[in-house]
Amino acid sequence: MLTFNDPKKLQAWSRLRRSKGEKIALIPTMGYLHEGHLSLIALAKKKGAKQIVVSVFVNPVQFGPNEDYDRYPRDEKADFAKCRKAGATAIFFPTPKNMYLDGHSTFVNEESLSQGLCGARRPGHFRGVCTVVAKLFNIVHPHFAVFGQKDYQQAQVIKRMVRDLNFDVEIALAPIVREETGLARSSRNTYLSDVERHDALAISESLFALRRKVRKLGKLPATAVEKEIAGHLVKNDLKPDYVEAVDAETLAKTDTVKPGTAVLVAAYCGNTRLIDNIVL
Ligand code: PAF
């Protein structure tokens, strides 16, 4: 597996691989890799990529001033070993300095899907995500890029950016990977104490219960669903940031929860903000 730090070197390598007709996949990550990330590599393999490039970059511009940029978990050595074992062919560890050159002043803003949900609570977050993902697309010029459905809003925003800006890349989405308990895998789970880890199960529990209910009843009023999930979270010592039923593609709020609706949750478990979702 090759290691790159310099965007220009990766760009030149990728251009050469592409010119040889090799199919290139990009997996953008912030590192501290877990089973969820490894499932993205597995999907890239399954889709026939000859070159699988994993980028590991804790992107400063997608964090707000009071967020966890400084303490976000990092372990380059472990990430390298996991990528190699999973079959990635290149790993990209850029630095904030070589990704954002002095005087960097160009950003990408998606102005619709990024407005609500996490976008409303984390101003500037999706501007940072779109900017770094656009840069990665230009550096790697992959045939396709793989993202996880756990960051549901992010995936929709990136799909929209790709459509609107005519990026020559296919976006593939991989299902949420959960621990045996149901907890959605996330690098931020490492912040949780044992008690918090237990409390956090209320999120997936309430989403699975909703799925059972929708299977049985077909349709439910969104306000009642949102209230019930938020109540279950509070009962388990979580602080809901939002619980919203939305159209799975436009992310517009919906009155009725039915098959095809996406229900997105963000909640604080102690100081840790967790997200999860279900598409019914
Ligand atoms: O989902 C993430 O880990 C990040 O938001 C991403 C897509 C790698 C951009 O920094």
Image: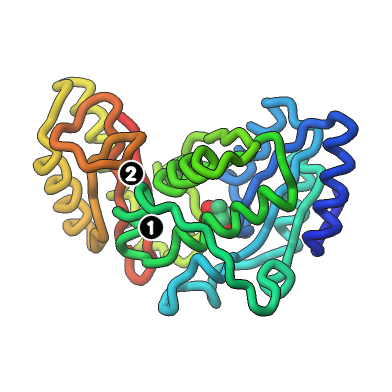
Q: Is residue 155 above or below residue 4?
A: above
Q: Is residue 65 above or below residue 41?
A: below
Q: Residue at x 61, y 41 (%)?
A: 167
Residue 8 % position (x, y): 82, 59
Residue carrying label 2: 204
Q: Is residue 161 above or below residue 192?
A: above
Residue 202 % position (x, y): 28, 50
Tell whether 183 sits left or right of 75. left
| Mark earlier in primary sequence (1, 2) | 2
Residue 34 % position (x, y): 59, 50
Type of amino acid under label 1: Leu
Q: Are marks 1 and 2 in contact (CB under 8 Å)?
A: no
In this view of the protein, which residue sits in the foreground, 224 or 185?
224
Asked which colour scheme the image uses, the reply is rainbow
Q: Is mark 2 within 8 Å of ligand 1?
A: no
Q: Residue at x 31, y 41 (%)?
A: 251
Residue 253 % position (x, y): 21, 42
Q: Secondary structure at mark 1?
A: strand
Q: Residue at x 63, y 73 (%)?
A: 104
**For the residue carrying disc 1, how many other residues have a C-alpha within 10 Å: few (<14), some (14-19), or many (20+)?**
many
User: Quarter for ligand 1?
Assistant: bottom right
Q: Secondary structure at mark 2?
A: helix
Q: Is residue 10 above or below residue 226?
A: below
**For the residue carrying disc 2, how many other residues have a C-alpha within 10 Å: few (<14), some (14-19), or many (20+)?**
many
- Check residue 128 in the rendering and tell me which mark sits there, or answer none: none
How far is the residue under mark 1 from the one under mark 2? 11 Å
Type of amino acid under label 2: Ser
Residue carrying label 1: 274
Tell whether 147 sits left or right of 54. left
Q: Residue at x 65, y 45 (%)?
A: 27
- Quadrant of the image for the C terminus? top left
